Image (cartoon, grey):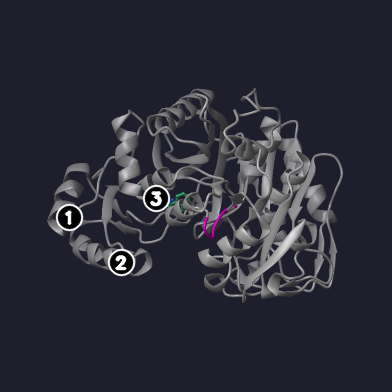
Amino acid sequence: MFKKILIANRGEIALRIIRTCKELGIPTVAVYSEVDRDSLHVVFADEAVCIGPAPSNQSYLKIPNILSAALITGADAIHPGYGFLAENAEFSEICAESNIKFIGPSPDSIRKMGDKAFAKETMKKVGVPVVPGSDSVINDVDEAKKIAAEIGYPVMLKASAGGGGKGMRIVWEESEIEKAFQTAGNEAGAAFSNPALYLEKYIENPHHVEIQVLCDQHGNFFHYGERDCSIQRRHQKLIEESPSPFITEEVRQKMGEAALLGVRSVNYEGAGTVEFLVDKYQNFYFIEMNTRIQVEHPVTEMVRNLDLIKNQILVAAGLPIADKPREPRGHAIEFRINAEDPEKNFRPSPGKIEYLHFPGGFGVRIDSHVYTDYVIPPNYDSLIAKMIVWGTDRIHAIRRAKRALEEFKIEGIKTTIPFHQKVLENEKFIEGDFDTSFIDKNINN
Ligand code: MV4
């Protein structure tokens, strides 16, 4: 097992990883930027190293600083968490060259799945359903026109180096495609230094359902069911739950099998998420794979009764997965508590937390790095806490969420708590009748 793990991240996920390391008896090293000195991940780690000033590109994204911190503290593994360097193939390669185990998949897997068109092609080859379209990158607008005419409008242009909604364009008719091809290509070139695009049929108001996978080098390729992440605003997830209230048992089974077919074919190692779109007829299509632990992983932990971070660490150490998949139990829902003002277009609301009280009681889990008097810096994403509730079924989970949000007190800053309370009163949400258009259609802010 590893002698010491450095956590190359901040906030709730850094603390989440430290907690599991403590339970495994592995010493931890926190890294922090100048504005994160007073964050709980620094307090709870065994050692902490300042890696630079507040801007991420001078601290949490600065590879030499993180490697230096690992070398001076004698860490033999690095957990990247999510965001920052988690899907940076070059970073994982440099770790390997420095004899430090990167807790995640191989650089090759990260690179291949980071290329969305290639990932799609790979999945299609082994029989995973994909959205009809170009399957690989398109070379010019004439090729785009030809494929679009074949599959029919509307279509979507997507950046191959993108993902998560960046560099995407909906094209409703042929007259718009030339301009869309130009602007999407330029946007992708500027954002990812790679203008390559692919094209697919536009699925209207899809459901977003993803499968958690975990694979080791002992021949275990497991999935732990789905998470429904359809409650999103501008590609930012706000609520995630499992099981999905939308998909049938048959689709659940088939989607899990499809995800495993995909990860087996690339001999994937570690934790990952296979993302699907599901249309109103319950047809499902692979769209992307994330080669990291995700924000919403606790939803799976609650209904599947396992520690995903622990299993990630075991797999990275060359050991077999400890927790084989079992039948799901009950229902879990995660609410992202962001320092944002839902009345002002979810504008970030950094600053000092004047008073904080977390809910508790049976079936309530809080993952958070903040406390009373903590000052939320303006430099990073605005997630300050995750509240995950568990119930014997969806209705009980919803009731528990309402009860817990009433107990949740944060003063001094605006948060997404009132937004969640509004969602919990919405008939459509309560009935489980929602897709990715839910917020636009139902929540007037
Ligand atoms: C799509 C789509 C409709 N048709 N692809 C957005 C983020 C990226 N991961 C994929 N996305 C979408 N891809 C086709 N062919 C609609 C979306 C989409 C979406 C997907 C998941 C969750 C929320 C979304 C919100 C708007 C659009």
Relative placement, left or right, of 44 versus 124 is: right
| Measured Cα–Cα span from mark 3 to mark 2 | 15 Å
- Mark 2 or mark 1, which has the lower sequence index? 1
Badge 3 density bin: few <14, some 14–19, many ≥20, Cα 10 Å: many
Cβ–Cβ under 8 Å for marks 3 and 1: no
Report the disc number at residue 189: 2
**Which residue bears the numbered disc 1?**
139
Where residue 203 appears, as percent x and y from the top left, is 36, 45
Q: Which mark is residue 114?
A: 3
What's under tag 3, amino acid-wise? Answer: Gly
Q: Nearer the viewer, residue 230 or 426?
A: 230
Q: Quadrant location of residue 409?
A: bottom right
Q: Is residue 401 above or below residue 394?
A: below
Q: In terms of sequence position, does the residue under pointer 3 or pointer 2 come before the other?
A: 3
Residue 334, can we see it? yes
Percent across and percent down for residue 244 are 58, 36
Instruction: Answer left or right for 432 relative to 425.
Output: left
- Identify the residue at horizontal 56%, vertical 70% (top origin): 56
Q: Residues within 10 Å of mark 2 (few under 14, many from 20)?
A: some
Report how far apart the C-alphas of labels 3 and 1 lie in the structure. Answer: 19 Å
The three-letter code of the residue at mark 1 reads Asn
The answer to whether residue 342 is magenta is no
| Residue nearest the observer in this picture, 203 or 413 | 413
Q: Is residue 217 above or below residue 437?
A: above
Q: Which residues are magenta?
A: 81-85
